[in-house]
Amino acid sequence: MPANLTPEFKKARERFRVAQSRQDKLAALEEMLTTIPKHKGTDKMRADLTRRIAKLRDPQPQVRHGKGFSLHNIQREGSGQAVLLGPPNSGKSSLLVALSNAHPEIADYPYSTVFPVPGMMSFQDVSIQLIDLPPMTSDYDEPWMYNLIHQTDLCLLVFDGSNSQHFTKAIQEILSLLEERHILLVESKTRGEVVDTAVHREILGRIVLTKGDLVDHSAVLQKSSSFFTTVSTSTLTSHGLDELRKMVFATLNIVRIYTKLPGKPPDMKEPYTLELGSTVIDAVELVHREFVDKLRYVRIWGSGKFDGQKVPSDHLLQDKDIIEIHLT
Ligand SMILES: Nc1nc2c(ncn2[C@@H]2O[C@H](COP(=O)(O)OP(=O)(O)OP(=O)(O)O)[C@@H](O)[C@H]2O)c(=O)[nH]1
Ligand SMILES: [Mg+2]
């Protein structure tokens, strides 16, 4: 299958070829990964790009503080992103370890995390990026943390559930720090609603209570549920971790779409992912930008339709729909 590389991809590849610094190389590779068409013909190239990016991103100590290189910028990956935010020692890094492939430092002393650490969490057949953050308190917060939160899809507020008498004060402290920086955590966002007012940026919020192995969480659950939907967990026993994965996926409103060729079974290995409310034409564009102009019709399986029914391009997609794209 031809790769059908886009002009943007080719430009990024040229930038990579001439890049001297590690930062420029990384930026060019990341651009290549975002502009490369996503289909079977580019599977190997995408895997190779991902490997090279990971290698460049894992900085050696001597280049860590290299000029212009920032450890605070995290490139988005996967079908959605959530940050782990909370007071010191609440168990954020432990959650990242339990849920992903990342290895942040875990310690019994506070402020053990200094830099953001990304990790990929699997849920069924999608990957969601989690970012472990340093603790946030009125004595310790840094502008880059708010920048990251500003751009994320979901804020997981992580609290030590064994510390129930301080819960309300602890959450109010974090919510007001966020509000001072014009970030408003919300239980849900309605599509079409104006979410970025001049005053606030709305970000989805959920609460994760940790250390459920130490005490019963029911008292603190009562308090936390009046703020946001809450999951009670323990990384020691793995209690609640499956529920947490499920909650993150459900909150991100991701729609998975599989593709098939006429007369062939669908490719169920790696879905394309879009946000809830996306239409058939959005999926076609994601499969290949050039397909939009060449589109004749799309047949769909799922969506409460007859199998293989032709649907208009503004048809709303549902999770796990299978589409068959017919071009002119
Ligand atoms: N018993 C128990 N201990 C936990 C659990 N999760 C974390 N811990 C302990 O709590 C301490 C803090 O854990 P971390 O994951 O480093 O907490 P953190 O929120 O990342 O801490 P900072 O980065 O310093 O803010 C460590 O000693 C962990 O072993 C849990 O579910 N049960
Ligand atoms: Mg930590």
Image (cartoon, helix red, strand yellow):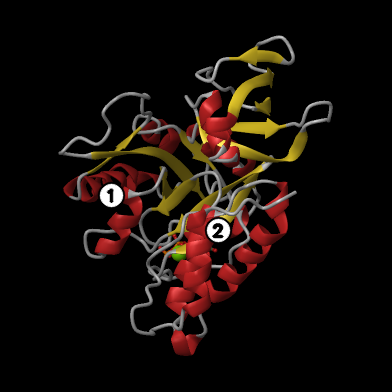
As drawn, which residue projects farthest toward the front?
328
Does the numbered disc 1 mark a residue whose Cβ is under 8 Å from ligand 1? no
Residue behind mark 2: 33
Rendered image quadrant of residue 68: bottom left
Image vertical order of residue 138 relative to residue 308, above or below:
below
- Circle 2: is it few (<14), some (14-19), or many (20+) Cα within 10 Å? many
Q: What amino acid is labelled 1 in the image?
A: Ile
As drawn, which residue projects farthest toward the bottom?
62
Residue displayed at 43% across by 71% down: 112
User: Residue 211 at what x, y percent from top left?
Assistant: 53, 51
Q: What amino acid is labelled 2 in the image?
A: Leu
Q: Quadrant of ligand 2?
A: bottom left
Residue behind mark 1: 174
Rendered image quadrant of residue 270: top right
Instruction: Report the front residue among 324 and 234.
Output: 324
Q: How many marks?
A: 2
Distance of label 1 from label 2 (alpha carbons): 35 Å
Instruction: Report the front residue among 76 and 207.
Output: 76
Secondary structure under the numbered disc 1 in the rendered image? helix
User: Residue 149 at what x, y percent from top left?
Assistant: 34, 51
Quarter containing the C terminus = top right
Could one spot residue 118 in this view of the protein?
no
Residue displayed at 53% across by 67% down: 13
